[in-house]
Image (cartoon, rainbow, N blue to C red):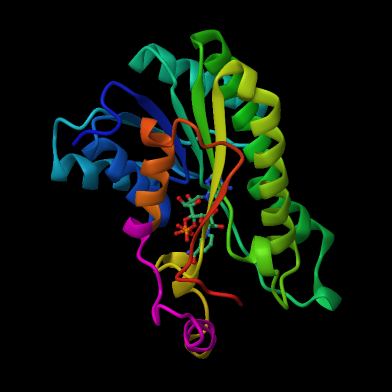
Amino acid sequence: MELLKGKTAVVTGGTRGIGLAVVKKFLENGAKVALLGSRQETVDKAMAALKEENPNYPVIGMCPSLSNPEQIHETFQKVKEAFGSLDILVNNAGVSAREPLYDYKPEDFNRVMDINVTSVFVCAREAARIMKEQGGGVILNTSSMVSLYAQASGCAYPTSKFAVNGFTKSLARELGKDHIRVNAVAPGVTRTDMVAALPEDMVKRITAPIPLGRMGEPEEVADAFLFLASDMASYITGEILSVDGAAMT
Ligand code: NAD
């Protein structure tokens, strides 16, 4: 079943990990997709992998600075020109850093907030302007289980994801009248490069208490985005959907 037939989507951080899984899932379900990445090389690599899977996939790739309003305006206009509309935005790009508070540099804190929060605001604002004019749309943000339980180091990352939840719930209230639904997916420990960068003992410590007894796969997180993007979730807005195997750490 093609749940997103005729829809168009922008996915930030769509070059790998959860974002690339979302791009694939959306394409498989009939959407036209613009994937955004941080560098042209990674965008090209992701595009090549997708085209190898299916040369007819309607997918384009770009690498604007996500917190730069002018670049995002231009990028989203190009998406509209290429696909005719912008129905779904997935704010997925994110970075993490785990320094202890005592050593945390303000510039590192700001870098995490810039990509995890400011870019979510900039992209959502631009998308909402287009969606309002079109008569509706869907904005989905990527939160994290740390937005519920926090974490004991790298304070900027959980702070940024708490902000994503607040932003999601606030926009849902503000944009409901314009027929724009706003939700977030909060993944738990998911098998991507972000997790591969963690020391093995830390991964073991994190996954051991998870009731489902394992990490999540990017495709499992992408399924939640697909559901929330589709009309199956037509009466759901302001929700933070956990996809974490009931993890509580
Ligand atoms: P990843 O590191 O594999 O991918 C991150 C993506 O973000 C990449 O496509 C990268 O190009 C993009 N990105 C990073 N910095 C960027 C920048 N400055 N400008 C543009 N794009 C940038 O990570 P992932 O694990 O797939 O994470 C995706 C999202 O899921 C993030 O928001 C992350 O916080 C969230 N998340 C991940 C996990 C996990 O366990 N992997 C858990 C909870 C939440």
Residue 12 within the segment the image draws in magenta: no
Residue 120 visible to the viewer: yes
Place residue 128 in its image quadrant.
top right
| Residue farthest to the front, as pictured | 235
| Picture coordinates of residue 24, whole percent (x, y) | 28, 44
Q: What residue lies at 58% left-to-right and 26% top-to-bottom?
A: 72
In magenta, the rendered stretch is 202-220
Q: What residue lies at 82% left-to-right and 74% top-to-bottom?
A: 101
| Picture coordinates of residue 108, whole percent (x, y) | 74, 60
Place residue 50 in its image quadrant.
top left
Left/right placement of residue 160 relative to residue 211 reads right
Q: What residue lies at 51% left-to-right and 11% top-to-bottom?
A: 135
Which quadrant: the C terminus? bottom right
Q: What residue lies at 36% left-to-right and 46% top-to-bottom?
A: 22
| Picture coordinates of residue 181, whole percent (x, y) | 54, 30
Residue 35 visible to the viewer: no
